[in-house]
Every structure is written in structure tokens, then in C-alpha cells.
């Protein structure tokens, strides 16, 4: 289960966030990112090998989990609430991909986790974007996708990934180098 | 790259990444793929090489052996380096944890440790000391001296001062020499491995560490990747897969020193494979051609170090010795004429067609250039614009009309509406109904100001819409115009009918926004942003002060309403850009900074945001002097301006009677040669131009009557003679002669014939002189000493006399200054892309006049100044948009006449009677070519 943040905090932050409060958005990211990571890791343990997950499903599950513990408001316009949450989660994932695909030297710079657009558009397009990016990478080679998921979303290190995939750390590193390069080009993150 | 190309890249990369050195090389060699796919694969392999297999946990804060591990200093293919402290010996250290791949192969790691220790055992002040090797169950680490300072990499972007270069170069060469004597080879000399401490001591790191698995087991030293570390500093033999020797280290050091000396890598290219190919096959340019302050001895030393043949390279000991005897103050071009020619060439539009070697076949067919116009150099094409439907071409010719040409049958007719305008650039409105004309009134008085007009496409009457604007570009709906201020530093919008301007982006002096184009939705404007980089070394190192301006270029796309930046890319040269509706951008980029060889490039951008979708791709590879691009709206038809080969030749023009504003009349070419001809003086009667020409092989002096077609030899022999001036009394001709290199002698010969006599045995390189050819005039010589110019009296009979005046040094090029007709003052131009100033220095301090500076409003980039014969004004030459412009300004700096445009910013030589001028201009033609098969 997800015991961490005080239920009210999340709900209040979500409300502020939907009103366009950027500070709330950043705080939400700080709170949600570890949760997302934990969930991803818990979900995947034991299910590995040739298996990849869907970011949309994952985010949905996170949402449901949070609703269940009443971390999020459950009354009224639940659909809008959910759409806003999915949008935010998608952004987090996209941001993670971008950060990981940066060259080392730039990653060392302090980067704000979430660059908020001026206007927040609720919706699922960001999660879908992450979905699409990952499946295109998976089309080149499924292992590339797995390595990215484990490294970026689950926070595993090279050794752990190698164990999971049953190959050498060197092979994982080779895959990661390629995937990183591909992501860097694909996401074409502008220097901010 | 598209998905399919990425798939292909994975196929090759995935397989190669799992292979070892030799196997990988032959595997890669057998692959056929598009160059960009291969380039991508190679750079990923390089990167994978530098990524530790299993990015290990950070060791900061832990203990290793007796060391306390501190911050992470760096990481690479060899492992990670941490700062550490040794509490027992109470000293700082650096600990390098060798990466597991290395330690897995015990033979490799032992050999490598042995070499590192052996080098350290030399106990050399410039080789880092290895303290100990620590072995733990899972790790091997080397504890060594901690060097607190900076890697030489930090200094590689711009030329370092020569004394600095010599100092560093000697220290490193000494370290290598000591190691080589014990048969220890470094194998990976590169700026990252060369540290300089704050006290100036350099230390060579990682001796022998790059070597892996060579020797007994017959494997190549090229290591696991086949491309170990970076390719950029490898010797040709290492690239070819041969074992590294002492000579390989010398080559690598040569690359490093070259880069420090010039600020440029000698084999710079856009991709690893091109760099590798260039190292193996291309001869580097002499360093002095990139940076003039480099002494001849260093110039030749660096070229020898970079010999392809290891046997021809000097040893490290020789390098040290050569550097020690190189002194500051002897620039490489001790040949004054080559300096002069180079000076003009650097500033000029030359057509240096250097066919650079390209080591790999270009898999895609090279686009074809088909010539459309056939103008000779005297009325070459200066700018051209293709209509959006691709059916009509407008092109402007030098000094002549603008033509409208039908693309299908080539029928061309002059456009009368544009008569009397000097057109800089034409841009069609998107619907093809009108054309925006950027230009200026030819011969306009009082000021120099570019203006913007709108012309109906059918040639109806012209309407001025913006006074004092440049780079005008209409929005897609035709309602607005994006344009810059005359100096290019402010970007504004205005209604297409004229009217109120709104500034949306501005930079400081020295900033220019060029290559403007709109996005198809009219929401963005994209441009090249050039930022002037003021010289760093000039003040402290006048010898390096050759006036070459440097810029930092970037790609920028801004919101057309707010000016907010939407997309940006650093270090991005993008000249003459054409934006296509699908987000592709065609543009020109030169092969190196200062080069006039341009290639056509294509860039994919997001049509909505302007963001770069991938790296730009070079589409033409033939080395042409391209200088303008225009495309139809769909990008199907593309035209480019291409210059031909040419030479400086002598031109003359008539001037109006005294007391009228000078204006060039009857501009005509005097010499018609395929050789270099530079005018310097006139005969006292004002009838003949005295010029130097290399028509006989070396530079000789000639005179030619301005109404005749043949030249008479004045001084002809088989050694070089340059810089001719006539003495004030009209009796003598003075010139510099080089009988034996490197000394230049100042010679004197009676103008009416007779034997030559030596006036000064060695004038040195900076022995520039000039004479005011008037009865009251005099001759003066200019030399540079420290941070000063010194002007000496020069008597045509007695030679060099006393010092007349000293003044602060400023960037200069040869022959850019002049003496007043009465011999009382000299005028010196600044060379600054931000403003135009002439310093006037009185030669006789006894008059009590102080030196003064005259500012010329509205101009920048002065390249030369010459005094009018009556002493009432100056002819000034400026560099602008890759061409030269000549103005006549009065002694207060007011522009009186915009005289002419030339292909080269040049100096003017007025005749003593004030009736004519002579000047040099390039004879290259320029024509419109169609680019097919893009």
C-alpha cells in the first residue's frame, strides 16, 4: 500500500494545482515521484523477462491506489480530477526520460524536475506520449525498452538490470548507451 | 534519422558493441550503411567505451585502504577518479578505481599498472607520481598525486599566447622525452590528460594507461572498442590499427599544441569518421594561416609533428629544443607579400577552391549545380531571389540593373523600377504578388542607410516602406515585415504598408540577427544570432592582434508577437536560410570559420515550435564559394549564387574636379591578368599606376598608363619586390625586396631609371612604410613594439631616421593606415565590428596638437583608410556582409559619399593630382546556379 503522504496534503495540492498553482505542481511532483517509482518496482518484481508495462496502466493504478487511501478527493468532478492527475503523472514520466537522456555533463547541472507550461492542459496526452516513445523504442529492440523502464522508472542500477535480464552488465551498458542516444535525439530536449 | 535508420543503427551497433578490437574493426569495415547511420554508430560505440559497464555506486565518503574517498573528480573508460586523503601521511591524493572490465583481464591490468609505475618512477617533475596500487577483493585502484589545476582542455577553444604555448609545450615534451628514453609510450596524449596547475606547472597524467593488451598476445593496442577513448588525438598509424610508438605521442602532442595555438583542431570535422579520415589523409593547414601571431619556427614545427609519416616527425627532445629557440615576434609569414595577400584574402571574398579530401564515398548522389546566368566579373550577380512558384528569378548585377528572368526559357529583362538602387537582398511575398527590396540609394550623400521598399511583382512603381532597416522579410500573409536595424542588432516588426515599428528583440553592439525567415503559420521568426566575441589576448599580446573578428553563432526562433525565445541551438552557423512549410530549413554553412567555401545544409525543425528535430545534414560536399540561397515555396526549386575563381587586379576611376564631393566615375579595370596585382602608388604626373604583380612568377613592380593596355616593367628580377611608394620629390621609387629569406631590404631606385641602392638592410616584417607623394609630404615607417606603434621618419636618401611619434597599439592589418598629404599626421583605422573610429596622430609633437579620434556614425568594421589628395577627407573601406564598401568621409567623420561596393574591402590609392584613384578588386565572377537533385 501507499502510506506515505498525508491524504489531505495531496488532495489540497491537487486542488491548487488545478487552479494553476505552479508551486503546488512542483510539490506534487516531489511527493508523487517516489510513489510512482515504488509502484513500478513493486508491480514488476517477479514479472520480468520479455514483459513490458504500459505507462498508462501504471499511472492509472497509481491513481486508483491514491483514491483508495483517500489521498485524493473522490467527490464531484472525479473525471476532471483524474484527467489532471494523469496529465501531471505523464509529465513526470516524460521529464524523467528527458533527464535520463541528457549527456552526463548536463545531467550534473541542477535541473528543476518539472518545467511547467504557462497553461496547464489536463488530459492523458503526456502519458500517451510516453507510451508511444517507449513502444517505438521497443520496436527497434524490446530489450532496449526494458532497460529504459528499469533504469528510468524503477531506478535499478546496471547490475540489478543485468540480473533481471540474465545478461552481463556490459551488455546492459551497451543497450543503455543506445537507448539514451535515441531518447536524446527523439525528445530533442532544448537547452533550457 | 528515421525509425528505419535507427533500426539499422541498432543492428550494427548492437553487434559491434559485443565485439573486441580487431574483430570489431573488420566487422565495421564490412558494413554498408548511410554515412549518418555509421557516424551515429561510431559515436555511440565511443560513448559506450567511456561509460563504465556498471555505473558503480558513488564511493564518496567511504574508505578504501587507508584512504578516505572524497568527491568524484571524473570518470571515463578507465574508471572513476576521486579526490582522497591519506590520514597516515597527511596528504591529499587522487584515487583511480579501474573499471571492472579492465580488472577482469589480469594480464591487461598488470601491464598497465607496470607502465604507470614505470613512468612515475622516472620521478619527472612533469609526470604525475603514482603512490601505490591498492588491490581489494573486487577492486583495483591506483593512488596518485592529486593535481589541483585545470586540464588543458579548458584552454582549447581560443588561441593561447605564444609564450604560454611554448612554456606548456616544452614541459610536456620534456615529460614525453624522459618517458620515451625508457621506452615508455603514453598512447593517449590529449588535453584531458594534461593538467596545468595554478602555478603554471604542467603534469602528464595516465601514462601508459591507454595501452591495453598489446605486446605479447599480438593484439592491437587499439583496445576493446576498436576506437579507444577519443579519436581526435590519435595518430594516423593508431587509426590504421598499428601499434603506438614514441612518434605517435609526438603526433598527438602536435594536435594538442596546434589546437592551443590556433583555437582550432587541425582535423576538425563534424563526425568521428570524418575526423579519423582527416587524420589519416588530410594535410593540416599551416597554423599561421589560422592565427597570424604564430612564429615561423613553431609553424613548421607543428606541421612536422603532424607528418603522416612517423619517421618524419621530430622526437620529443627535438620538440622541446625547437620550442626553446622559438621566440616571440617572428610571425610565420615573414614574407610580407603573403601577409598582405592573406590579409586581403581573409577579409575578401576569395574563391579559394580547396578540394578537401573526404575519406569516404558519399552514398547519396551529390546534388548537381547547373549554371543559369552567365555574367562576367565586372557585372557579376550580387543577389538573387526565386519566386514562390519557382517560375521567376530576380537577380541583381554589380553596378548594373536587376533582371527578371523566366525560369522556363531563360528570357531576362531589366527591371526599370529598381534603377539607381543598390540592392542587398530581395524577398518575395508568399503569394508572389510583391517583392520586398532591401538596399540603398547608390551614391547617396550625407549618410549610409539601408532602406526597405515594396515592389509589385510586375515591376510597377516602388514604394519605400521602411527607412533605415535591413534584412526585411515579409510575413506569410503579407501583412507584416520582420526586419533589423541597419547594424542588425535590433529585430522589429512593422506593417507591410509601413507605419509603426515594434521592437521584439534586441542585442548589444556587435550583435547581428540575420537569415530571417517566418514560420508558415506566421507565428514565429527564426534567424541566426551572431554575437561578437571581443578579442581576449589582444591587449596583452599585440603580436597576435591581427584583426580577425570572431563571432559566436546560434540558431534562434522567437514568438513573432512577444519576441520570446521558443527554440535555440548553440554553436550553429546558418547563413542565407530558407524555411520550408514542412519545417525543413535549407541554409549555407562554411567549412571552417573564415572560410569562403560554403556547403548546403538541411535541418529538420518542428514546424510549430521551431525546435530542432535532429542534427543538420550536409547535402552538398563539393567545395564551392556559395554565398546565397533561394528556394521556391515547396522547396522543389533551389538556386544558389556561386563565385568563380579570381584574382585581385587593378581598377581605376575618375574623380570630379576639386571642391566637389568625390564620386567614382568611369570605374574600369586596368589590368587583365590571371595573376595577383596590387596598386600602391602613382607616377608624379598622375598618369600611371605603379603596382606589384606576380605575372612573371614572383612579385615585380610595374607601371601602366591609365589609358594604355600594357604595363611597363619598373623593377623586375627573380626575387620578390613589394610595397612601392614614390618619394615626395617624385625622384625615387622605394620598395621592399626579399633577396634571401627571411630578411626584407628597403630599396631605392631612381624613378626615371638607374641603379638600385639599398636604403635599409633589414626592415623586418613590420617595416611597413608609406609616403605622401606631395612636395610638402614625407615618408614614414610603422613598426610595432610592445603595446605601441612607433612611427619613424624615413628619408629616401638617408634611410630610417628618428622616432616621430609613438601611439597605443590597436588591431591592425598591413597597409590599413595612411599619412596626410602634408606629412603632418597619420590616420589609423580601428577594426571593430561595433563601431568605426579613425585615430589621427600628429607626427610632430612640437605643433602641440594631441592625437584625436574621429568616429564615423553608422559604419563599423573599418578595414582601411586613405587620405584624399587634397587632405580634406578620407577614403575608408569597410567589411560588410562578405563584401567591401567604400565611402568618402570628411575629417569630422561625416559620410559624404557612398562610393561603391567592391568584392573585397580594399585600400584606395588616390593619384597625387586628385583626379583619379586606383584600387584592387577581385576579378571573380558570380552567377546563379540551379541546385538539382536535393
Image (cartoon, rainbow, N blue to C red):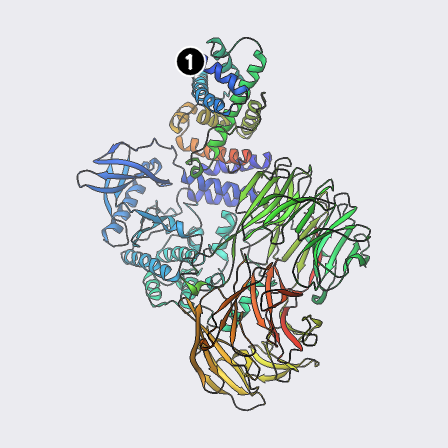
Percent position (x, y) of residue B642? 67, 58
Is B698 situated left or right of B168 in this image? right
Pick whichever, B348 or B208, lies toward us.
B348
Within 10 Å of disc 1 (Cα), the crowding (few <14, some 14-19, many 20+) is: few
Residue B166 in view in this figure:
yes
- Secondary-structure class at tag 1: loop
Please tell me which residue is depicted at 35% across the width and 37% down the height of the picture: B101
Q: Give the total number of marks visible in the rendering.
A: 1
Percent position (x, y) of residue B17? 45, 37
Whether B644 is drawn above or below B769: the answer is above
Q: State the residue lying farthest toward the front.
A: B848
Please tell me which residue is depicted at 43% across the width and 35% down the height of the picture: A107
Pick whichever, B752 or A51, lies toward us.
B752
Whether B257 is drawn above or below B738: the answer is above
Whether B655 is drawn above or below B130: the answer is below
Chain of the residue under the numbered disc 1 shown in the image: A
Q: Quadrant of residue B168?
A: bottom left
Is B218 situated left or right of B820 in this image? left
Q: Quadrant of residue B612?
A: top right
Pick whichever, B206 or B905, lies toward us.
B905
Q: State the residue lying farthest toward the bottom.
A: B754
Please tell me which residue is depicted at 29% across the width and 54% down the height of the picture: B201
Percent position (x, y) of residue A34? 42, 21
If the image is split into quadrants, where does the N terminus of chain A sit?
A: top left
Residue indicated by mark 1: A6
Residue A144 in view in this figure:
no
Is A126 situated left or right of B403 in this image? left
Percent position (x, y) of residue B762? 43, 79
Amino acid at each position: 500500500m501507499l502510506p506515505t503522504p498525508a491524504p489531505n496534503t495531496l488532495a489540497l495540492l491537487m486542488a491548487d494545482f488545478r487552479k494553476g498553482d505552479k508551486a503546488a505542481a512542483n510539490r506534487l511532483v516531489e511527493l508523487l515521484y517516489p510513489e510512482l517509482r515504488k509502484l513500478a518496482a513493486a508491480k514488476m518484481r517477479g514479472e520480468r523477462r520479455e514483459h513490458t508495462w504500459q505507462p498508462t496502466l501504471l499511472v492509472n493504478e497509481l491513481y486508483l491506489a491514491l483514491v483508495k487511501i483517500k489521498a485524493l478527493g473522490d467527490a464531484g468532478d472525479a473525471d476532471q480530477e483524474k484527467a489532471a492527475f494523469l496529465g501531471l503523472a505523464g509529465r513526470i514520466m516524460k521529464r524523467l526520460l528527458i533527464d535520463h537522456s541528457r549527456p552526463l555533463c548536463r545531467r550534473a547541472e541542477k535541473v528543476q524536475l518539472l518545467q511547467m507550461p504557462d497553461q496547464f492542459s489536463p488530459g492523458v496526452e503526456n502519458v500517451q506520449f510516453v507510451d508511444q516513445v517507449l513502444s517505438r523504442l521497443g520496436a527497434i529492440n524490446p530489450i532496449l525498452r526494458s532497460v529504459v523502464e528499469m533504469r528510468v522508472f524503477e531506478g535499478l542500477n546496471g547490475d540489478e538490470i543485468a540480473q533481471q535480464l540474465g545478461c552481463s552488465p556490459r551488455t546492459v551498458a551497451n543497450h543503455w548507451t543506445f537507448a539514451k542516444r535515441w531518447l536524446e535525439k527523439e525528445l530533442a530536449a532544448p537547452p533550457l | 534519422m528515421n525509425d528505419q535508420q535507427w533500426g539499422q543503427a541498432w543492428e550494427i551497433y548492437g553487434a559491434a558493441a559485443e565485439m573486441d578490437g580487431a574483430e570489431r574493426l573488420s566487422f565495421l569495415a564490412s558494413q554498408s550503411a548511410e554515412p549518418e547511420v555509421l557516424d551515429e554508430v561510431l559515436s555511440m560505440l565511443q560513448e559506450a567505451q567511456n561509460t563504465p559497464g556498471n555505473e558503480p555506486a558513488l564511493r564518496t565518503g567511504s574508505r578504501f585502504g587507508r584512504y578516505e574517498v572524497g568527491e568524484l573528480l571524473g570518470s571515463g573508460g578507465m574508471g572513476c577518479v576521486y579526490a582522497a586523503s591519506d590520514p597516515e601521511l597527511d596528504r591529499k591524493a587522487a584515487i583511480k578505481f579501474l573499471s571492472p572490465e579492465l580488472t577482469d583481464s589480469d594480464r591487461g591490468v598488470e601491464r598497465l599498472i607496470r607502465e604507470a609505475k614505470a613512468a612515475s618512477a622516472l620521478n619527472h617533475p612533469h609526470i604525475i607520481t603514482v603512490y601505490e596500487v591498492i588491490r581489494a577483493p573486487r577492486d583495483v585502484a591506483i593512488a596518485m598525486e592529486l593535481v589541483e589545476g585545470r586540464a588543458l582542455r579548458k584552454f582549447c577553444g581560443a588561441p593561447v599566447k605564444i609564450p604560454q604555448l611554448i612554456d606548456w609545450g616544452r614541459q610536456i615534451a620534456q615529460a614525453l622525452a624522459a618517458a620515451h628514453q625508457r621506452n615508455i609510450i603514453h598512447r593517449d596524449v590529449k588535453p584531458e590528460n594534461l593538467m596545468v596547475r595554478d602555478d603554471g606547472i604542467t603534469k602528464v597524467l595516465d601514462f601508459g594507461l591507454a595501452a591495453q593488451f598489446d605486446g605479447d598476445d599480438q593484439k592491437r593496442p587499439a583496445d576493446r572498442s576498436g576506437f579507444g577513448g577519443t579519436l581526435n588525438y590519435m595518430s594516423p598509424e593508431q587509426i590504421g590499427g598499428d601499434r603506438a610508438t614514441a612518434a605517435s605521442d609526438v603526433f598527438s602532442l602536435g594536435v594538442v599544441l596546434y589546437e592551443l595555438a590556433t583555437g582550432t583542431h587541425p582535423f576538425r570535422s563534424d563526425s568521428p569518421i570524418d575526423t579519423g579520415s582527416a587524420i589519416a589523409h588530410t594535410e593540416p593547414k599551416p597554423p599561421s594561416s589560422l592565427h597570424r601571431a604564430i612564429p615561423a619556427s613553431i609553424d613548421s614545427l607543428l606541421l612536422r609533428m603532424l607528418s603522416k609519416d612517423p619517421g618524419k616527425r621530430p622526437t620529443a627532445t627535438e620538440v622541446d629544443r625547437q620550442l626553446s629557440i622559438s621566440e616571440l615576434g617572428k610571425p610565420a609569414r615573414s614574407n610580407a607579400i603573403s601577409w598582405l595577400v592573406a590579409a586581403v584574402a581573409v577579409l575578401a571574398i576569395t574563391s579559394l577552391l580547396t578540394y578537401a579530401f573526404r575519406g569516404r564515398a558519399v552514398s547519396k548522389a551529390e546534388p548537381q549545380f547547373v549554371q543559369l546566368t552567365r555574367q562576367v566579373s565586372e557585372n557579376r550577380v550580387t543577389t538573387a531571389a526565386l519566386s514562390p512558384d519557382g517560375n521567376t528569378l530576380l537577380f541583381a548585377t554589380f553596378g548594373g540593373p536587376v533582371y527578371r528572368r523566366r525560369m522556363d526559357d531563360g528570357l531576362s529583362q531589366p527591371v526599370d523600377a529598381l534603377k539607381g538602387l543598390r540592392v542587398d537582398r530581395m524577398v518575395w511575398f508568399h503569394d508572389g504578388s510583391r517583392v520586398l527590396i532591401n538596399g540603398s540609394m547608390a551614391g547617396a550623400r550625407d549618410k549610409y542607410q539601408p532602406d526597405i521598399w515594396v515592389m509589385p511583382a510586375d515591376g510597377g512603381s516602388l514604394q519605400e516602406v521602411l527607412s533605415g532597416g535591413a534584412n526585411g522579410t515579409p510575413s506569410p500573409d503579407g501583412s507584416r515585415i520582420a526586419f533589423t536595424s541597419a547594424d542588425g542588432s535590433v529585430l522589429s516588426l512593422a506593417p507591410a504598408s509601413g507605419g509603426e515599428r515594434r521592437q521584439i528583440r534586441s542585442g548589444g553592439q556587435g550583435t547581428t540577427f540575420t537569415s530571417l525567415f517566418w514560420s508558415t503559420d506566421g507565428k514565429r521568426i527564426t534567424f541566426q544570432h551572431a554575437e561578437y566575441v571581443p578579442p581576449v589576448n589582444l591587449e596583452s599580446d599585440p603580436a597576435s592582434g591581427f584583426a580577425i573578428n570572431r563571432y559566436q553563432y546560434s540558431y534562434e526562433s522567437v514568438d513573432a508577437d512577444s519576441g520570446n525565445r521558443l527554440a535555440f541551438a548553440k554553436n550553429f552557423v546558418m547563413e542565407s536560410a530558407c524555411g520550408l512549410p514542412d519545417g525543413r530549413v535549407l541554409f549555407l554553412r562554411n567549412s571552417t570559420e573564415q572560410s569562403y567555401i560554403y556547403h548546403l545544409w538541411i535541418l529538420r525543425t518542428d514546424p510549430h515550435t521551431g525546435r530542432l528535430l535532429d542534427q543538420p545534414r550536409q547535402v552538398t560536399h563539393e567545395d564551392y564559394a556559395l554565398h546565397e540561397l533561394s528556394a521556391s515555396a515547396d522547396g522543389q526549386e533551389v538556386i544558389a549564387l556561386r563565385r568563380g575563381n579570381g584574382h585581385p587586379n587593378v581598377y581605376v576611376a575618375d574623380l570630379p574636379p576639386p571642391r566637389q564631393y568625390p564620386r567614382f566615375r568611369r570605374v574600369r579595370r586596368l589590368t587583365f591578368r590571371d595573376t595577383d596585382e596590387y596598386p600602391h602608388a602613382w607616377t608624379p604626373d598622375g598618369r600611371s599606376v605603379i603596382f606589384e604583380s606576380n605575372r612573371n612568377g614572383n612579385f615585380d613592380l610595374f607601371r601602366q598608363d591609365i589609358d594604355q593596355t600594357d604595363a611597363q616593367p619598373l623593377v623586375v628580377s627573380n626575387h620578390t619586390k613589394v610595397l612601392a611608394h614614390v618619394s615626395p620629390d617624385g625622384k625615387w621609387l622605394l620598395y621592399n625586396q626579399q633577396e634571401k629569406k627571411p630578411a626584407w631590404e628597403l630599396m631605392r631606385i631612381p624613378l626615371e631609371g638607374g641603379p638600385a641602392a639599398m636604403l635599409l638592410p633589414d626592415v623586418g616584417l613590420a617595416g611597413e612604410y608609406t609616403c605622401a607623394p606631395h612636395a610638402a609630404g614625407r615618408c614614414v615607417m610603422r613598426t610595432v613594439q610592445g603595446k605601441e606603434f612607433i612611427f619613424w621618419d624615413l628619408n629616401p636618401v638617408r634611410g630610417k631616421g628618428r622616432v616621430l611619434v609613438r601611439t597605443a597599439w590597436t588591431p591592425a592589418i598591413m597597409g590599413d593606415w595612411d599619412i596626410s598629404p602634408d606629412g603632418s599626421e597619420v590616420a589609423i583605422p580601428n577594426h571593430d565590428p561595433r563601431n568605426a573610429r579613425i585615430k589621427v596622430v600628429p607626427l610632430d609633437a612640437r605643433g602641440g596638437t594631441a592625437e584625436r579620434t574621429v568616429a564615423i556614425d553608422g559604419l563599423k568594421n573599418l578595414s582601411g583608410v586613405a587620405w584624399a589628395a587634397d587632405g580634406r577627407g578620407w577614403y575608408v573601406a569597410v567589411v560588410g556582409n562578405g563584401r567591401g564598401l567604400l565611402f568618402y568621409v570628411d575629417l569630422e567623420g561625416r559620410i559624404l559619399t557612398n562610393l561603391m561596393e567592391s568584392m573585397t574591402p580594399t585600400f584606395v590609392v588616390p593619384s597625387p593630382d586628385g583626379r583619379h584613384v586606383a584600387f584592387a578588386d577581385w576579378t571573380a565572377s558570380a552567377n546563379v546556379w540551379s541546385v538539382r537533385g536535393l
